[in-house]
Image (cartoon, rainbow, N blue to C red):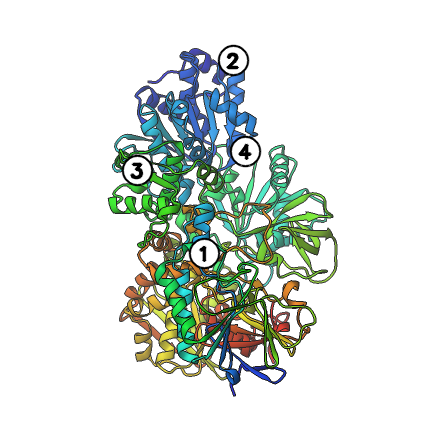
Amino acid sequence: MNQYEFALGEARLVPDLSGALWWPDEATMIVADLHLEKGSSYAQRSAQFLPPYDTTATLDKLERAIRCLHPSRIIALGDSIHDPRAVERIDDGQAARVAAITETVEWIWVAGNHDPSPPVGWGGRVEQEITIGPLTFRHEAQIGALREISGHYHPKARVPARGSYVHGRCFAHDRKRAVLPAFGAYAGGLNVLDPAIATLFEPDFAVTVIGKQRLFRFAAAQLA
Amino acid sequence: MTTLPPNIEAWFAHRGWTPREHQLAMVQAAVDQTSALLIAPTGAGKTLAGFLPTLVELAERPRQGLHTLYISPLKALAVDIHRNLERPIAELRLPIRAETRTGDTPDVKKQRQRKSPPQILMTTPESLALLLAYPDAEDMFRPLRTIVIDELHALAGIKRGDLLSLGLARLASLAPAARRVGLSATVAQPNLLRGYLSKTGADATDVRLIRGRAGARPEISVLETRERMPWSGHMAVHAMPEVYERIKETNTTIVFVNTRAQAELCFQALWRVNEDNLPIGLHHGSLAIEQRRKIEGAMSRGELRAVVATSSLDLGIDWGSVDLVVQVGAPKGASRLMQRIGRANHRLDEPSRALLVPGNRFEHLECRAAIDAIDAGELDGDPVISGGLDVLAQHVLGTACAGPFDPDALYREVLGAAPYFGLARKDFDDVVDFVATGGYALGAYERFKRLKKREDGHWELADKSFARAYRLNVGTIVESTMLKVRINRGPVVGEVEEYFGSTLVQGDTFVFGGQLLRFVGIKDMVMDVVRGGQGEPKVPAYAGGRMPLTTLLADRVRGILHDPSKWPALPEAVREWLELQRWRSTTPSPDALLVETFPRGDREYMVAYCFEGRQAHQTLGMLISRRMERMGLGPLGFVATDYSLATWSLRSPTTAQLVELFDEDMLGDDLESWMDESSYLRRTFRNVAVIAGLIERQLPGQRKNTRQVTFSSDLIYEVLRKHEPDHVLLRATRHDAARGLTDIERVALLLKRARHKIEHRALDRVSPLAVPVLLEIGREAVHGEARDAMLEEAEADLVQEATALVAEPRAPKKSTRR
């Protein structure tokens, strides 16, 4: 058993160092908030020229996770592209990489607020939300839902250490639900203790923080 | 001999003054049409010397149009100088309009100033940059004759100075006849400042050096406290009753501290013992501007007996009636101390008086070293560093806002700015390319470009709206995101860093502006608080508050440590401490590196006395830990002070291993991987990215979306480093890292010096000199270095364990002895 594994009902779930969540029993890999082409959206909107490599970086990471975990199904939990015009801006080569992935696995685009209608022509199928076995997958958590896996909030943990803090993207989870960290290279984060996230959970929820070489588990009470 | 016009001569006489030699020399420089640098101590009538030539010229040949541009690093200074200048203008009935222009100037007035400029305009480097970015800049500046730069020593060598130098280069094209005048405090290398003023950008021969007579030698003493001298900490709270006694004996005192947190604590401690209710004020950079003006006003009217201040009062208004300067905590540099002491100068011939109050034993040595340096006339030299490419990017965009530019001409112009002398054409072209489209190898943003190239090869702004963005983002000062602090939904009293705000929960109390406040909540970047509250209050800390020890002082501290003949001048507690050290181990010598190892609890400690400043030691700590890991020593942690570095591990290194640990090649091998983790480079990148216009500033009051649509500069840095390591902004970042802290360079020099000269003392227990650094364990913040290591510590609570191992000797209050 993996030391960072947690369970929602019957489903055993394993956080991956990449930021993906792995559901071994279904060979399913779940990623949230890819925000592809976030960089170029700023160039288009306000001539702020962020390095145009975020899509490459995100896809590199995605491909590495796929090579590691060998999923037969991938669920992208919405906000996969940063804005509807991302499809016009993306480099042909990068778009081809996405298409190549969606051809080899069962790919499900869950709709998000940035991409109410996920990209056409990149393969895969689109769902508003989807239930597989005991688990429901949607972009934004719903109050009262059970055994739910969602993204949207980009949770980030702040761990007190040496009179300072270490920040890291994190998975937040309790017995009822899990919220995934953003997978996209430029996606920022919201402190997991912010009421927007924390109120979704039981007071004693846990986080799994993504370090450089390994994961770390903390109780919400240990965070700041 | 230079003579003044009769009316001005009469004005001097009327005020009971005689023009000073250097003031006349400045008038002569104007007659000779040459640029000049005036170096004189505070109180020497420097500012008047700067303006005198202008008054003379305009008295003799009145005319309209901008004649003199006065540039100061501080808005407040511009305002204050304006007030002082109004007096001779009014009394002499000179036909001169003198006005200020800063960020606080109302828009209506700003517009009028452009249409009908005053003869004398007083402004800041940022406001000058904005003026130069208007299409009509050429008309406004064409008649300009003189540019006066005040407090030049505080501008040259930093990014604001880079920005100003580019503005000066622009002015040299718009108003070729204008000469430059620099006013500066005493500096170690005046020729660097002459070079800065020079229009050639290179040699300084076109700038005349004028020196004011030196003032009386300052009287500086170190407080020998009646209290127990602390082993560590910088707050010197123990000495506040004694500081209070001095305040009582003196008319007006400035109590300088090193950080804003320290200012709050000192202020509190002074008021606790203020039985006579003396008017004692507080001044630091996070207090609301009105608050600060109020204190400054009260101070200049002589209504305050003392003010506790940070570097926010290092420069600026000459109060003329400060009798004593108290420096609490280590001075950190001789030049900095001189500057601060100079604030207590009323009459040039009377000595300034200063009292240094060290917070701990090492700081006492540092105070002694600073006094010795000042007595010997030594000042800290500033390293010469070329101008930042990020600042150049901002300037290029500003230039395009004024109108289309010819890249060849602009390149030649930029070379005339001293910090950019010798700038490679490739760097210049890369900067222009960055401004136009981001400068990425892929050319991904061709279709969104900011600048477009016309057929004649000139660059022009692709859309007028970009000028607005430029105006909002101008300047080189990048602050952390701040929260305004508002009491009872009423007045805003100042700002705290956002991260501090986010550590508070409802009901928490903290000290700010000398008041005890209770946290209510945060909304839209405003923190609501009410007065009062209970419980142990927190003190807001601010990033970047701590400066490293200068090389000059570090050398001198080492000198004192190694030379027992200097010890009798030290107080008993410090002397005993050093004697004990000599008996138990040895004292560090100037040309070798002392390393002590000793066991304590079930840990092996190693303490290296490098004296290269905290930042450099942190870098070294990272690198050494990696090596210890590879040697199988099982490193568990490290901690750094300005003076030494301590590590603790499972096994102790042998002498042979120590030599290997401190081997010079560490910088080649491990530096790159250290860079990966270095939060210093990330912070530097953030500043570079904001200044260059890659990231827009978060403007005060701008609503922050809780969904965090903003991106983090860390993420951009990571991606850019990986995919385009030679991008112009990364080059600028690396260049800056060398400027801000000569961190890596200091480590390199240390390792070179220590080669084959490691003096290893294997002790059976902790040495007296090692106690202060061990006491820092668990207290010291390490900002995000070695994230995983810190997360591991947090997981295992290792810090707590290490702290428990070190008990403070003879300090029953703080003892953690078990």
Residue at the disc numbered 1: A86
Residue at the disc numbered 4: B320
x and y, in percent, of residue A14 in the image:
52, 80
Q: Is residue A138 left or right of residue B679?
A: right
In this orientation, which residue lies closer to the viewer: B151 or B169?
B169
Is B597 above or below relative to B114?
below
Disc 3 chain ID:
B
10 Å neighbourhood of mark 4: few (<14), some, or many (≥20)? some
Q: For the residue labelled by badge 3, is the local secondary structure a helix, a strand or a loop?
A: helix
Disc 1 chain ID:
A
Mark 3 and mark 1: Cα distance apart in space: 39 Å
Residue at the disc numbered 2: B93
10 Å neighbourhood of mark 2: few (<14), some, or many (≥20)? few
Is B464 above or below relative to A221?
above
Question: Do tags 4 and 2 sit on the same chain?
Answer: yes
- Between disc 4 and disc 2, whose residue precedes? 2
Kindly identify the residue that appears in the image at 39 percent across and 24 percent down. B141
Q: Is residue B494 left or right of residue B634?
A: right
Q: For the residue labelled by badge 1, is the local secondary structure a helix, a strand or a loop?
A: helix
Q: For the residue labelled by badge 2, is the local secondary structure a helix, a strand or a loop?
A: loop
